[in-house]
Amino acid sequence: MGHDCPVCGKKNESASKLTVHLRTHTGEKPFECTVCNKKFSHRCNLKTHVRIHTGEKPLECTVCNKKFSEGGSLRKHLRTHTGDKPFECTVWNKKFSQGSSFRKHFRTHTGDKPFECTVCNKKFTESGSLRNHLRTHTGDKPFECTVCNKKFIDSVKLRVHLRTHTGDKPFECTACNKKFTTSGSLRMHLRTHTGERPLQCTVCNKKFTASGSLRMHLRTHTGDKPFKCTVCNKKFLHGGNLRVHLRTHTGDKPFECTVCNEKFSQGGSLRKHLRAHTEDKRFECAVCSKRFRQISHLKTHLRTHTQGHDLNIQSANGS
């Protein structure tokens, strides 16, 4: 006698296998973990799950002796040794060693975002991205820096942050060998070599190398000033301008001249001041070649030529 599923017609080799199969339709999960009460439809899944609690890892890689709690993880790991990539994208012909990586990739072609936030309805291509996003609602920051105790919503941000303590800069520019703490910083830097400006303003068509620069530029069109001084309520386009402004309230002058120890609230003011010590006069008048330390002084000087030129014109017209 056959053991066909009365719901979907699938054929099963035995009555016991039919019983297990039927649970995919009924949702029955008769096997319960005695530690955390999680339930499973198969006894073998419960057995594998229990190892999370016991720490048991009975499966060992024959190449590097790394141990695993279940067969699927061992099979995936073995591909790091063999180089086997059985999952292939039919659009780009790109191959993947894991089915989960392939599924994530394929969503870049389909635009499918199956994971939805129950708070704001934002959708994501990966469950991990949704988990991280949910923490923006809950305020949960489970990843803590062991050096300064700063907390982060995901492990990637923590890893990047730790580099500020270690000084590690693993991403190196192949053109000039400059190193960076993040791959994103390297990508933006490479554009200084290639001249690429892939981000364009939809208002005036000006192009930018970085999304942050484009966002700041857009504020010149919208008039948006999101950075507000908590002392006098003055608003600013850029966070940097707000930080400089706050020093007018705090009196903070973090930039100190190494020659005379005079302090300044802005780096630009210190650079101007240093020219008084170095005699650096980089701004040259194109008319008389007189040089100035500051561009503002050159602009004032240029008016002496402009005024004289205007007088000559007026005199010539009057003759």
Image: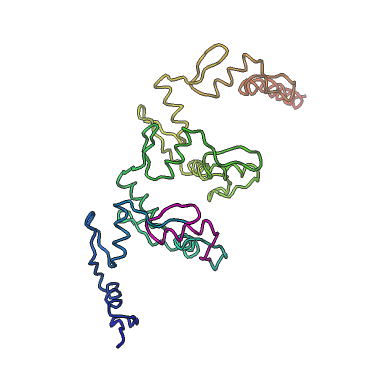
Q: Residue 185 location in percent, x, y? A: 54, 42
Q: Residue 50 location in percent, x, y? A: 29, 57
Q: Residue 51 location in percent, x, y? A: 32, 55
Whether residue 199 sits left or right of residue 281 in the image: it is: left
Q: Nearer the viewer, residue 258 or 159?
A: 159
Quarter of the figure that contains the C terminus: top right
When asked about the image quadrant of residue 289, the answer is top right
Q: How is the image coloured?
A: rainbow
Q: Give the answer, above or below, for where 222 lies relative to 295.
A: below
Q: Give the answer, above or below, for where 96 lies relative to 154.
A: below
| Residue in view at x 50 percent, y 61 percent | 97
Q: Nearer the viewer, residue 22 or 190?
A: 22
| Residue in view at x 58 percent, y 21 percent | 271
Whether 306 is among the magenta residues is no
Q: Which residues are magenta?
A: 62-88
Whether residue 171 sits left or right of residue 231 in the image: it is: right
Quarter of the figure that contains the N terminus: bottom left
| Residue in view at x 72 percent, y 19 percent | 290
Q: Give the answer, above or below, for where 3 lies relative to 278.
A: below
Whether 87 is among the magenta residues is yes
Q: Nearer the viewer, residue 50 or 168?
A: 50
